Image (cartoon, grey):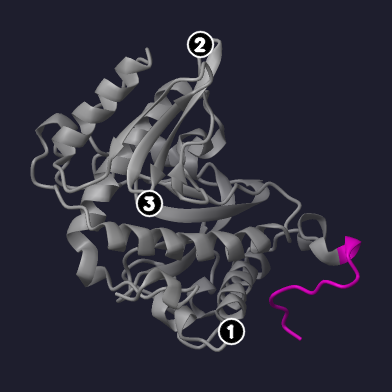
């Protein structure tokens, strides 16, 4: 591992923090499910996600009765913080502890603030799905690794946010899905998609049917698929020729195993201009979906720099 101050794009080998990653995955599912229990449904489950914050991952504002609350993983101070609109603040230190203990502490913290948390107490999209209250297998927390992961997300979130700004059609926020533990941003063509076949472990097929109900091009980052994680991009439905469409930068490839384009995080981190390398991957993989899928690009795309004559995009094909 590299020290957080060593580089804006830190190195964090997946093999060095797998136990912490898997524990943190379960912790984020618990917190994400609490947001899901209180937030009204938004298309494609956008209401359940977490967001990259200046200190970690946050639920953002969760409506509750006539007020609101927020839960944040602080990976700088290594605490879970809960703040409510009536001025209440509670939290506890993040340290090595079993998922069962974390779950109990979260419920106790919410109870102290008078917040009820009726969630389905089992994880999704993983196998086996150990009930939270019974999970003593996942109990690791390496604070340095958690901070480095957040710093990876911070960089990915920044570049993906700039990429998002080039699209004026329907596009998701850059948000963190706790089901698969990935940071994602999704663009939509405006057309309906065929029903998704589902198949995610311990997750009803109807969840995927809603998530993929419209034709889309999605990109993101997750701590897998490479020695230090990987950026990914896919289309649903996948247009003919998608896998063979040329994309950049060097190091990007189509994975027959995952059925999507991958770019190892380490290829971005070690590039002369990491921002440009990632932007090239995001733009060219989107173009593969939009060109081959015959999207109405003139109606959906825009130049966010049009209001500022001194600014230039991080990446362009010229």
Q: Residue at x 76, y 52 (%)?
A: 168
Location of residue 310 (image quadrant): bottom right
- In the rendered image, which residue does mark 2 sit on? 65
Q: Is residue 273 magenta?
A: no
Query: Is disc 1 placed on a helix, strand or loop?
Result: loop
Q: Is residue 38 left or right of residue 143?
A: right
Nearer-N-terminus badge (3/1): 3
Nearer-N-terminus badge (1/2): 2
Q: Residues within 10 Å of mark 1 (few under 14, many from 20)?
A: few
Mark on residue 273?
Answer: 1
Nearer-N-terminus badge (2/3): 2
Query: Is disc 2 placed on a helix, strand or loop?
Result: loop
Q: Answer yes or no: do the residues labelled 1 and 2 have beta carbons within 8 Å?
A: no
Q: Is residue 309 magenta?
A: yes
Q: Which one is closest to the eye, mark 2 or mark 3?
A: 3
Q: Residues within 10 Å of mark 3 (few under 14, many from 20)?
A: many
Which region of the structure is painted magenta? 306-318
Mark on residue 75?
Answer: 3
Q: Is residue 148 left or right of residue 136?
A: right
């Amino acid at each position: 591992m590299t020290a957080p101050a060593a580089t804006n794009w830190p190195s964090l080998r997946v093999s060095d923090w797998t136990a912490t990653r898997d524990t943190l995955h379960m912790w984020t599912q618990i917190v994400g499910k609490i947001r899901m229990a209180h937030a009204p449904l938004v298309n494609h489950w956008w209401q359940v996600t977490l967001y990259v914050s200046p200190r970690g991952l946050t639920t953002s504002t969760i409506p509750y009765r006539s007020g609101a609350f927020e839960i944040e993983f602080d990976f700088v101070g290594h605490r879970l913080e809960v703040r409510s609109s009536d001025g209440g603040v509670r939290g506890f230190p993040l340290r090595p502890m079993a998922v069962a203990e974390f779950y109990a502490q979260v419920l106790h913290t919410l109870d102290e603030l008078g917040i009820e948390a009726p969630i389905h107490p089992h994880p999704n999209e993983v196998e086996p799905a150990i009930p939270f209250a019974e999970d003593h297998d996942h109990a690791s927390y390496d604070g340095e690794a958690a901070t480095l992961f957040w710093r990876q997300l911070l960089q990915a979130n920044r570049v993906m946010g700039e990429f998002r700004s080039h699209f004026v059609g329907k596009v998701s926020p850059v948000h963190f899905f706790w089901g698969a533990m990935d940071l994602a941003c999704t663009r939509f063509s405006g057309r309906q998609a065929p029903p998704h076949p589902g198949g995610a472990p311990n997750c009803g097929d109807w969840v995927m049917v809603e998530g993929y109900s419209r034709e889309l091009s999605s990109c993101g980052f997750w701590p897998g698929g490479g020695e230090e994680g990987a950026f990914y991009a896919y289309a649903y439905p996948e247009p003919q020729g998608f896998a063979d469409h040329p994309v950049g930068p060097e190091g990007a490839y189509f994975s027959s195993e995952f059925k999507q384009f991958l770019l190892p995080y380490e290829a971005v981190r070690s590039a002369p201009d990491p921002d440009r390398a990632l932007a090239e991957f995001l733009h060219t993989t989107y173009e593969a979906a939009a060109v081959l899928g015959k999207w109405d690009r003139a109606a959906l795309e825009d130049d966010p720099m049009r209001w500022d004559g001194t600014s230039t995009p991080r990446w362009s094909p010229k």
